Image (cartoon, coloured by chain):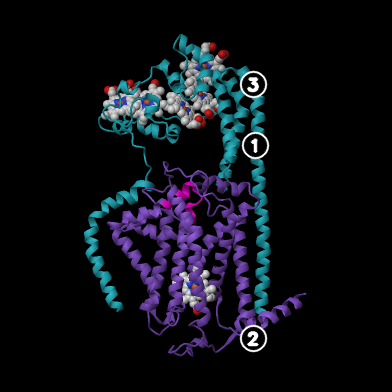
Chain colours: A cyan, B purple
Amino acid sequence: MRYFCFMIIVVILSITVPVSAGYRELFEKEFLSKPWSSEILEESACVECHTSEAMPVELRSIPQEWQLSWHYQNDVSCHDCHGGDSTDATMSMSHKRGFTGTPKYTEVPEQCGKCHIGILEHYIESGHGKALKETGDGPNCVTCHGAHNIQQVSIDIINAQRCSKCHSYDRAKMMKQALFLTDEKIEKIDEDLKQLRSKGVYPEKEEKRLFDTQAKFRTLFHSIDVARVKSETDFYTEQLDSIEADVQKTYDQLAFRRKFSTFLMLIFAGSWIVASYISKSYKD
Amino acid sequence: MWQKIREGLNLRIGLTDLVDSSLKEHRVPSDTNIFYTIGIVTLVAYFIMAVTGYFLLMYYVPHTDHAFSSVQNIMTNISFGWLIRMIHIVASNLMVALVFIHLISIFFMGNYKKPREITWLAGGLLLLVTLLFCLSGYLLPWSQRSYWATTIVTNIPTAFPVVGEYLANVLKGGEAISGVTLTRFFSLHVGFLPPVFMAIVGLHIFLVWRIGLSVPPFSKSAEEEKPWTEYSHTTYAESYPFYPHFFMKEVSMVMLLFAIIFFIISFFPTMFIPEAANTPADPFKTPADIKPEWYFLAPYQMMKLIPNKFFGISIQVIAIFTFLFWPFFDTGDEKNIIKRPALMGAFIILLSVWFALTFWGRYS
Ligand code: HEM
């Protein structure tokens, strides 16, 4: 009986294995490559064609740069900036489908400002914005952030190399000093929140508050008005302090949890020792 | 006071007599080892799961929009919700580990042999039910990790030609993991599996009780064992009463289990909840490094390595059946594995392959 079952299994296997061999590719596609071993790119006709041989070499690296960017991580794709239709390869760059092409140097702020509205407002009123509009030699968004490989910002964007191209670095330096303390606080809280996440907490509320505060504060820079930054700093410090206090509470809570469960652990470890001692003390 | 209650119960249900006849007179061989307590410890782990699970159920909402936030609510706002959830998570992993230890020790001591084949079969089913518990519970927090790890595991059936796709879709309730999958897994986890588990565990323990614990094959009294020709409760050369002798041993091991649970919660709280478990599920974003839980790593890695997937899944299905019905294949009288070098070798190779695949899967 046993051997009979065994033989049946062997027969079934030896028939079906070759039969299903062609199934392999299909399966590998479905099972190994699709959902987890590589990232699912939202299929975009722009990306597909712009990485292909049809592209002039000097432009071919753009999709790669973009894939490293923070925009990529937040699902901001080619057509969000350039317009056009990312689902239809033949018509994608048609102006009928809203394609706007490469923005001119002076048009860039409007393009980015579609989404970064507050920043655009500050920027237009600023010395930089006015200079761009009037003479065309103010810096635009791309000068400081790049176009495709845009990363999360830090205060290090203000550096001697970038900011002394058009004027002396002194002005930039004063700005940096005015931003410095608040910026540092933002970074610290951000770091703390990341830590909390790795400790198994999901500090959603605090993360959102920090995001809002930081977005507002970092918008302020674009006015390049040192006096204004200084006068509004107090307001932001207060906001950040309150977030920091909440974060601290969470840390205290974690410390309490550890103590509490260590206490339980000791109780049970004690019971274990007592119980095993009692069990050994029984004589038959 | 105690005396009164006891007398009252004695009068009505004959308590002392019951305890004497069913607990004190129940004998346990005196050369049992520590592994003989693992079964009870596993059972207690199950009850820990049931009790903590019941409390989680009060606040958990099985809906894709609320599942993640309701779990976070338990962790942050509900008083001692964190403790309940942490115990549930840690105990679930320990329970799987315990089932494995129980199984391996029983296999190693040959205790599945006549007359304990059905006990083994019921136990094997319990292992499968335990793994189903883990699989279904894993999705419930609706985090990035639970979403994608479940995607991986539920894709394994697609290895079957023709019916595979269908099987996987039945499991998921559609092409992809969705709200339907969540409600399916939820009802499986809290509605279907617990009574099934209780029924099988009832049979399992009834059989152990009825047949009597086995004697380890390495002990002196094992050599005196006669072949099993007709039913009688197992007799032992040397034995002691179940209660309080063996019972106290079990109590001490259960205390150790609790101590280990709280040790992990205190000092390695994130052992089983990495960062991806703190991020809400996002079907459009595959996390970089997602893996199934440690107990599914070996089969997962094996599926990745074997080029013909149907072959891979067949090996696994055959392995499961061989495992379940092993006592019916291995019917010889020799219990002592040390006197059976071939089986011993196969057993060691199997274990090392399992460990190797697990580590490979973990670090690849
Ligand atoms: C949820 C999981 C399980 C629970 C709660 C459980 C519980 C128990 C308990 C309480 C005992 C008696 C004490 C002992 O020997 O430890 C026992 C014995 C036994 N179990 Fe399990 N068990 C489980 C899983 C398994 C599995 C997976 C197998 C093997 C496939 C298995 C096979 C056996 C056998 C053959 C015995 C008899 C041992 C003897 O008489 O010495 N059990 N089980």
Q: Is residue A222 above or below residue B80?
A: above
Type of secondary structure dominating the magenta stretch: helix
Q: Residue furthest top?
A: A134
Residue that numbered label 2 is attached to? A284
Q: Badge 2: few (under 14), some or many (20 or more) residues near its Cα, within 10 Å?
A: few
Residue that numbered label 1 is attached to? A244
Image spot of residue B281 (x, y percent): 47, 45
Q: Residue at x 62, y 52 (%)?
A: B81
Q: CA distance from mark 2 to mark 3?
A: 84 Å
Displayed quadrant of residue B341: bottom left
The dot on residue A58 is: none
Q: Nearer the viewer, mark 2 or mark 3?
A: 2
Indicate yes or no whether the magenta region holds residue A174: no
| Marked residue chain, label 2 | A
Q: CA distance from mark 3 to mark 1?
A: 21 Å
Q: Which residues are magenta?
A: B137-150
Image spot of residue A55 (x, y percent): 27, 28
Q: Nearer the viewer, mark 3 or mark 1?
A: 1
Image spot of residue B320 (x, y percent): 38, 67
Displayed quadrant of residue A196: top right
Amino acid type of the residue tagged 1 in the rendering: Glu
Looking at the rendered image, the quarter that the N terminus of chain B falls into is bottom right
Residue that numbered label 3 is attached to? A230
Judging from the image, what secondary structure is the residue with disc 1 in?
Answer: helix
Displayed quadrant of residue A112: top left
Q: Residue at x 62, y 23 (%)?
A: A178
Amino acid type of the residue tagged 2 in the rendering: Asp
Q: Residue at x 28, y 30 (%)?
A: A89
Image spot of residue B196 (x, y percent): 48, 66
